[in-house]
Amino acid sequence: MKSEHPVHPAPAGAAARKAVRPVICYPVENLPRPDLTALQAVRAGWVKTGETLVPPRDAAAFRVPAGHFFRIVSVEGPQVGDLNLWNDADLSERFYSGKTRALHGTHLSTGDRMWSSFPHLRPLATITDDTLDWYGFDSFGGAVHDVIGTRCDPCTHNLLSHGGQYHHCCHSNLTRALAAATGLPLHQAESHVHDVLNVFMCTGFTRDTGQYFMKASPVRPGDYIEFFAGVDLLGALSACPGGDCSAEHSSDVATCHPLLVEVFAPPSPPQGWVRPARNGYDRTHGV
C-alpha cells in the first residue's frame, strides 16, 4: 500500500499532475449489449431441470447447457459464494475475472457479462436478474458481487497464519469439486481453478489505504443472482467458510449456510440469440 510518509518530496507542479482527470481504460459504448428483454421473456414457461445444494464450507459442481439459465439462491441465511465457470468442452476457456472487471467495473449486476479467457474472450454467461441490485454502492464504497478478490486460499492463509493448514478455503473447495466433476487428479484440477465472481459478497477498497475490505453481506434467504449460459458451462460454487464475511474467513469460526444452484430450460431460445463466437483476433501478433 502507499506509504503515509513518502521518502521523496513532491516536485514542483505535483498538484497539477494529480489534478489530471482520469479516462476510462475500456470505453464500452461499442460493446454490443445483450438483449435483456429477449432473454428475460423466455423465462415464462421455463422448466427447472436440476438443482445442486452446495454444503457450507464446501463446493459443488454443476452443468448448464447453452441457452439455459441458472440461479444461485440464498436458502437458509446470509452466505457468500465463490463462482468459477468453464467451457464444459474445453477447460482452458474459463471465466476471466480481470477482463470482466476492466469492461464492467469492480462489481457486477444485471446486464453484465462474464467474459472468458484469451484467446476466446466471449461471454460465457450474462447476468439476467439480481435481487440485490438495490444495494448499489454504500457510504464506505462497498457493493455486492465483486470481481476484485481472487478467492480465499490455503497458500495465503499459510503465509498469514505462521504455517497454518486449512483445507476448506474456497480455492481448495473448488479444486475438490472440479476434480470430482471431471475425474482429474487434484493437482491437475487445481491448475484450472481461477479468480472468481464473489457472489453476494459485499466488498470495496478503503479510501485511505486502498486495501480490499469485506463487510456483512446484505443477502437474505430468497435472494438470488441469475445467469443465462452462452456456451455449455461447467460451473463450481464454493460456500465460503467466511459465511456472510462480516468478520473473517479461512477458518471454522463463522456461521455458514448452504447455497442452492437451480438450472432452468426455457421453452424456446431467446429471440435473435446465437451462441457467441470466439474472439475475431487473428492471433498473428504482428509476425
Image: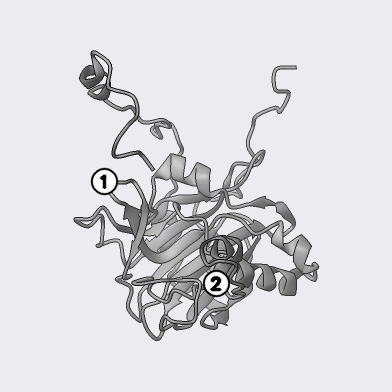
Give whichever of 77, 231 is nearer the camera.
77
Residue 10 appears in the rendering: yes
Instruction: Judge whether residue 63 can be spotted in this image.
Output: no
Quadrant of res 11: top left
Identify the residue at image location x=61%, y=61%: 155
Q: Position of residue 125 (x, y in %)?
A: 53, 55
Q: Which of marks 2 and 1 is in front?
A: 1
Colour treatment of the image: one colour
Rendered position, 118 above or below 177: above
Which residue is under mark 1? 208
Closest to the observer: 150 or 218? 150
Q: Left or right: where does residue 98 sit relative to residue 172?
A: left
Q: Is disc 2 surrounded by few (<14), some (14 to 19) or many (20+) residues within 10 Å? A: many
Percent across and percent down for residue 109 are 37, 56
Q: Which amino acid does label 1 sit on?
A: Asp
- The residue nearer to you, when weighing 68 against 28, is 28
Q: Which mark is residue 238?
A: 2
Q: Residue furthest left?
A: 139
> Left or right: 169 with respect to 90?
left
Q: Residue at x 41, y 71 (%)?
A: 248
Mark 1 lies on a secondary structure that is loop
Q: Position of residue 47 (x, y in %)?
A: 52, 77
Which amino acid is tagged 2? Ser
Q: Residue 134 carries which label?
A: none
Please tell me in which quadrant of the rendered image residue 23 appears: top left
Q: Give the structural element (helix, strand or loop) at label 2.
A: strand
In x, y percent, where is residue 169?
A: 56, 70
Q: Is residue 24 above or below residue 174?
A: above
- In the displayed structure, 102 sits above or below 270; it is above
Between 126 and 139, the one nearer to me in the picture: 139
Image vertical order of residue 220 relative to residue 185, above or below: below
